[in-house]
């Protein structure tokens, strides 16, 4: 076998409680420090113990941000690992597992690795995941002393005995793999040349969302915990003292959005975070935000529904919900970032847009994007200016004064001498309830005047490939950017290009113009094609093909490649 390849995919499988997450927590920083480009994603069952969970780590010679179905190396720890992953295991897949514990057919390239015995020799069953870490480091050819060093860093807070046990366990795993035949040991990428010498960070989507919120000047978050949206709450709570953030864990989602609206009315830059099921309860608050023209940012970490659905899996099923949430007509904006850098930028834009146009602004992510970890150049993170948009009031201040652009100067209580009167009933310029038909017409028009400038200032979609000449445009939004762009690069067909939307409402006119007179294929993780429907409405014609997936899994690069090859032969 060759010593080096461009891409190696390792998959670690085990029951909940066996330490699969510990494996990636230990390995990823070491790989990053040694100059590798990495991408890691996990899928796990909604149970405390048992089941079968996997973590995929891709080690690549160039930056990648996509899930692949192919497994080059599998280290399985639960008896059902082969059964669950049989369609991903190829004849050439190197498999390390305890043969007498596994059900299903033993793979062609299987190695009987006595994980339980090695863990017991190191100090007990709890060290099995550390045995696996040592085995993986040995497969990658990392020096053994680095394994001991990373164990010391990872477990130093738990005392010297725990450090020594883990070092022993990792060393035993390392030694076992070192004895394997060279023919069995897979080739692997060398340290990446792309980005060499630049400062890199290791980050997941939730951290990027939190960093973007801090950069945007967020100083209030309210939430009732619901995965996968809870991560933003815990991130900001962990940095609350450092950045002066008020954190409110509300009694329910209705209380959460109303608390955030109250904070925003008082001048805070407020966010709520939830998932689709929690957002169902917030819709009256969204409508209230539209009527009282109070800015708020709403983050929805999408997961499969309806109801509880698959609470730990991924989907893009809440776009239609967000587009139509809240009764009555009023303006809104919706972002759906697809990379770590886009998450940071779009979060800042969401806060600024909410303040500038005095509207609810949504950020749509999903479990896959939030939990995925990858390397990112520090230079990719940019801080935007913080748009405040608050004026000092005078005695004649009117919160809803009619203006040519529909935007009234926004005051907050206590800043100036004016009264900041708001009301959920229809109201006149000063906020006094009215039933005047003429005033009602003025106010409806006032609230909708923002739609045009919102569209004109929307983020343009990001093109890939020969966008000007391609016959077919592959359209995606949100977390599918990485998988689409990689598949497009691998197929290398001049007739194909891609367009990724990180803002899905309103849509920039120039981006829609790129789709004129083209064949359009839309890729999205839902059952009906929610973005396809929006595009069809905007373009005045149906899209040509919908590539949909609603199993709770992300798209794999291989799936997109197969669809593109089929497209080329049509």
Image: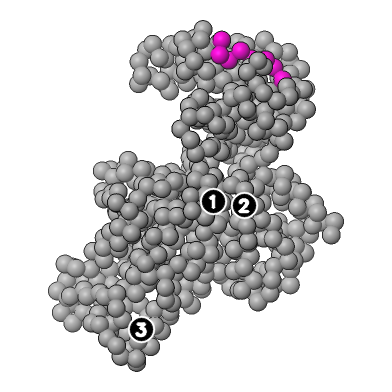
Q: Residues within 10 Å of mark 3 (few under 14, many from 20)?
A: many
Q: CA distance from mark 1 to mark 2?
A: 8 Å
| Residue linked to disc 2 | 550
Q: Quadrant of the C terminus?
A: bottom right
**Secondary structure category for the residue under label 1:** loop
Labelled disc at residue 456? none
Residue under the image location 66 percent in, 55 percent down: 548
| Residue linked to disc 3 | 443
The answer to whether mark 1 and mark 2 are in CB contact below 8 A is yes
Residue under the image location 55 percent in, 69 percent down: 507
* Marked residue nearer the N-terminal end (1 or 3): 1
Looking at the image, is 396 positioned above or below residue 200? Answer: below
Looking at the image, is 188 positioned above or below residue 113? Answer: below
Residue under the image location 40 percent in, 14 percent down: 162
Q: Residues within 10 Å of mark 1 (few under 14, many from 20)?
A: many
Residue under the image location 65 percent in, 77 percent down: 540
Q: Residues within 10 Å of mark 2 (few under 14, many from 20)?
A: some
Q: Nearer the viewer, residue 274 or 375?
A: 274
Give coordinates of residue 392: x percent, y percent.
21, 71
Q: Which residues are magenta?
A: 110-117
Q: Is 116 within the magenta? A: yes
Give coordinates of residue 96: x percent, y percent.
65, 20
**Secondary structure category for the residue under label 3:** helix
Residue 350: image quadrant is: bottom left
Q: Is residue 347 visible?
A: no
């Amino acid at each position: 076998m060759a010593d080096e390849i461009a891409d190696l995919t390792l998959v670690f499988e085990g029951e909940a409680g066996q330490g699969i997450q510990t494996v990636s927590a230990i390995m990823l920083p070491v790989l990053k420090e040694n100059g590798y480009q990495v991408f890691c994603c996990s899928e796990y069952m909604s149970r405390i113990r048992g089941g079968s969970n996997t973590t995929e780590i891709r080690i690549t010679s160039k930056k990648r941000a996509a899930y692949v179905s192919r497994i080059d190396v599998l280290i399985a720890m639960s008896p059902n690992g082969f059964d669950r992953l049989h369609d991903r295991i190829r004849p050439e897949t190197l498999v390390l597992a305890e043969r007498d514990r596994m059900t299903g057919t033993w793979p062609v390239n299987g190695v009987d690795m006595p994980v339980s015995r090695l863990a017991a020799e190191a100090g007990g069953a709890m060290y099995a995941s550390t045995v696996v870490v040592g085995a993986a480091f040995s497969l990658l050819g990392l020096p053994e002393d680095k394994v001991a060093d990373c164990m010391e860093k990872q477990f130093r807070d738990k005392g010297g005995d725990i450090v020594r046990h883990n070092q022993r366990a990792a060393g035993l795993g390392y030694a076992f793999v070192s004895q394997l035949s060279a023919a069995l040991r897979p080739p692997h990428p060398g340290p990446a040349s792309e980005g060499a010498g630049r400062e890199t960070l290791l980050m997941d989507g939730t951290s990027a969302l939190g960093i973007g919120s801090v950069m945007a000047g967020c100083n209030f978050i309210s939430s009732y915990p619901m995965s996968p949206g809870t991560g933003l709450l815990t991130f900001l709570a962990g940095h609350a003292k450092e950045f002066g953030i008020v954190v409110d864990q509300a009694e329910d989602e209705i209380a959460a959005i109303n608390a955030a609206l109250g904070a925003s009315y008082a001048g805070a830059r407020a966010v709520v975070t939830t998932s689709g099921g929690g957002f169902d309860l917030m819709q009256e608050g969204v409508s209230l935000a539209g009527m009282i023209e109070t800015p708020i940012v709403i983050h929805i970490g999408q997961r499969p529904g309806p109801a509880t659905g698959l609470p730990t899996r991924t989907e893009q099923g809440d776009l239609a919900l967000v587009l139509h949430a809240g009764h009555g007509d009023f303006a809104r904006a919706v972002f759906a970032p697809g990379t770590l850098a886009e998450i940071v930028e779009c979060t800042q834009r969401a806060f600024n847009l909410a303040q500038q146009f005095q509207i609810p602004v949504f950020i749509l992510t999903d479990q896959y994007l939030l939990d995925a970890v990858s390397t990112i150049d520090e230079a990719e993170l940019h801080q935007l200016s913080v748009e405040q948009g608050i004026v000092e009031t005078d005695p004649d201040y009117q919160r809803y004064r009619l203006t040519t652009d529909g935007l009234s100067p926004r005051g907050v209580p206590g800043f100036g001498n004016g009264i900041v009167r708001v009301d959920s009933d229809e109201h006149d310029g000063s906020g006094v309830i009215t039933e005047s038909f003429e005033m009602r017409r003025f106010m409806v028009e006032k609230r909708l005047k923002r739609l045009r400038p919102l569209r004109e200032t929307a983020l343009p979609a990001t093109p890939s490939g020969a966008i000007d000449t391609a016959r077919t445009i592959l359209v995606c939004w949100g977390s599918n950017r990485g998988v689409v762009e990689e598949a497009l690069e691998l197929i290398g067909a001049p007739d194909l290009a891609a367009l990724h939307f990180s803002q899905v409402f309103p849509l920039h006119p120039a981006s829609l113009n790129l789709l004129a007179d083209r064949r359009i294929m839309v890729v999205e993780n839902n059952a009906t094609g929610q973005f396809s429907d929006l595009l069809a409405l905007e373009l005045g014609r149906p899209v040509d093909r919908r590539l949909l997936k609603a199993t709770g899994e992300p798209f794999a690069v291989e799936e997109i490649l197969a669809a593109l090859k089929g497209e080329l032969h049509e």
